Image (cartoon, helix red, strand yellow):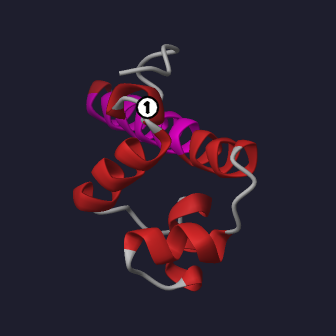
Amino acid sequence: MFTKINSKYLCCCILVWVIKMNYTIRMRNLREDHDKTQQQIATVLGTSQTMYARYERGANEMPIRHLLTLCDYYKVSADYLLGRSDKKSL
């Protein structure tokens, strides 16, 4: 049985999961739309392909510096990449 505290916690967990899924899907879609491999994007970020794959799957949180680099690389806003907006352009 859920108490008010547990249901608030559950709602927060679900919200975090939805946000994470939005940005991981958008990361993969942007990469594929630009015909890039995970290795190519990892090189742009200065990280390994394995670590980039973990970001794309949502297994690891991506550092803000990588978020900003991807936004500049794909020429999209951070809000778009994070799933907070449907508008791609800056």
- For the C terminus, the image quarter is top left
| Apparent side of residue 28 relative to residue 63 in the rendered image (left or right) | right
Query: What's drawn in magenta, residue-wise?
Result: 5-23
Tally the numbered discs.
1
Relative height, residue 68 to residue 10 (above, below): below
Q: Residue at x 51, y 41 (%)?
A: 23
In the image, residue 6 lies in the stretch drawn in magenta: yes
Image coordinates of residue 13 in percent, x first then y, are 41, 41
Q: Residue at x 58, y 60 (%)?
A: 56
| Amino acid type at mark 1 | Val
Image coordinates of residue 70 in percent, x first then y, are 41, 51
Image coordinates of residue 49 in percent, x first then y, are 58, 81
Image coordinates of residue 87 in percent, x first then y, are 48, 14
Relative height, residue 51 to residue 22 (above, below): below
Relative height, residue 90 to residue 24 (above, below): above
Q: Secondary structure at mark 1?
A: loop
Q: Residue at x 34, y 34 (%)?
A: 78
**Which of the pair 6/57 is nearer the observer?**
57
| Apparent side of residue 4 relative to residue 52 in the rendered image (left or right) | left
**Which of the pair 34/54 is nearer the observer?**
34
Answer few, some or many: residues within 10 Å of disc 1's Cα (few below 14, many 20 plus, some between 14 and 19): some
Q: Main secondary structure of the magenta part?
A: helix
Q: Residue at x 60, y 39 (%)?
A: 26
| Apparent side of residue 43 relative to residue 40 in the rendered image (left or right) | left
In this figure, which residue is indicated by the disc labeled 1? 76
**Which of the pair 21/2 is nearer the observer?**
21
